[in-house]
């Protein structure tokens, strides 16, 4: 229950669940290691639909008004899938060119914003309607060949028409419609968390165990504080 934290229902899947679920419109969406996407009722766990996509170890799923979206990475290519949230039927599958260290993209306003690389870091926007690339733009971070290095991963978030992207030791504000850069804040130290926007402030944590508060409109530092432990 909500008050006591006791179990209200459970569902057996016969497959490992290693990704964070998504919730929308009273339904829980989860992906399994074998590529099965499940839709379960929030109220009682009853099955709404199941889609055995055939994707090996898909990403976590994300629910949007456009559907249930998840990503696939393999040695040949990287893809994004969009399933109908009511039926589970595949609406769209498209390839992400030059993808690197691929994770589930940022989804907003009918687009998927993804990190790719072709000799250098790139942020690209794709339509969730037809998969077409709307724009792509270079980022300041260097190309990383060691995926075990946390600085090899780009983290991004969306708020009010703006993409905040952390790449290496930089944070940038990008216009979500065009990809144009609004501002850049540099020399933060390696960033290994998603920039978080709340109450008019952008928060970024770094590997040097520091938390920065940045003005999201102009990209200036409001304050910095040291943290105990690694974020």
Image (cartoon, grey):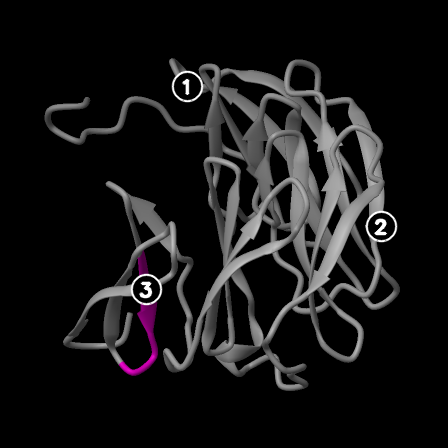
x 79%, y 50%: residue? 79
| Relative image position of residue 118 (x, y in whole percent) | 80, 73
**Residue 135: percent from left, percent from top:** 76, 49
Q: In this view, does 206 lie above or below 63?
A: below
Q: Look at 47% across and 45% down and name the residue there.
A: 20
Residues 103 and 48: in front is: 103
Q: Is mark 2 on a helix, strand or loop?
A: strand
Residue 42 disc label? 1
Magenta stretch in the rendered image: 203-208
Mark 2 Cα shell of 10 Å, populated few (<14), some (14-19), many (≥20) = some
Q: In which quarter of the image is the N terminus?
A: top left
Q: How far apart are marks 3 and 2 (CA)?
A: 36 Å
Whether residue 202 sits left or right of residue 104 in the image: it is left
| Left or right for 6, reference 162 | left
Residue 199 vertical position relative to residue 99 in the rendered view, above or below: above
Q: Which numbered mark, 2 or 1, is in the foreground of this view?
A: 2
Place residue 77 in its image quadrant.
bottom right
Q: In this view, does 120 lie to the left or right of 148?
A: right
Tell me residue 127's x, y (percent).
Answer: 76, 36
Which corner quadrant of the image does residue 142 belong to?
Answer: bottom right
Crowding near the residue tagged with mark 1, few <14, some 14–19, many ≥20 C-alpha atoms within 10 Å: some
Q: Position of residue 170 (x, y in %)?
A: 47, 73
Q: Which mark is drawn over residue 95?
A: 2
Which residue, given by chain and number where applicable, does mark 3 sit on?
220
The residues bearing labels 3 and 1 have C-alpha atoms spaced at a distance of 42 Å
Q: Which badge, 3 or 2, is on the more N-terminal residue? A: 2
């Amino acid at each position: 229950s909500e008050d006591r934290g006791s179990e209200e229902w459970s569902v057996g899947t016969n497959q490992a669940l290693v990704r964070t679920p998504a919730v929308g419109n009273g339904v829980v969406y989860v992906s399994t290691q074998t590529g099965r996407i499940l839709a379960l009722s929030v109220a009682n766990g009853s099955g709404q639909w199941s889609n055995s996509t055939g994707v090996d170890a898909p990403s976590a799923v994300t629910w949007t008004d456009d559907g249930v979206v998840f990503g696939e990475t393999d040695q040949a290519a990287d893809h994004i899938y969009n399933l109908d949230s009511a039926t589970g039927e595949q609406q769209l599958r498209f390839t992400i060119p030059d993808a690197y260290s691929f994770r589930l993209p940022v989804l907003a306003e009918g687009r998927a914003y993804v990190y790719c690389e072709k000799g250098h870091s790139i942020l690209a926007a794709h339509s969730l309607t037809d998969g077409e690339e709307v724009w792509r733009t270079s980022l300041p971070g260097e190309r990383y060949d060691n995926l075990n290095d946390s600085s090899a991963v780009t983290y991004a978030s969306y708020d009010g028409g703006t993409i905040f992207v952390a790449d290496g030791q930089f944070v940038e504000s990008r216009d979500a419609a065009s990809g144009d850069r609004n501002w850049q804040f540099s020399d933060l130290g390696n960033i290994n968390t998603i920039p978080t926007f709340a109450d008019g402030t952008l928060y970024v944590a770094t590997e040097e165990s520091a938390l920065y508060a940045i003005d999201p409109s102009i990209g200036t530092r409001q304050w910095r504080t040291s943290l105990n432990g690694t974020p």
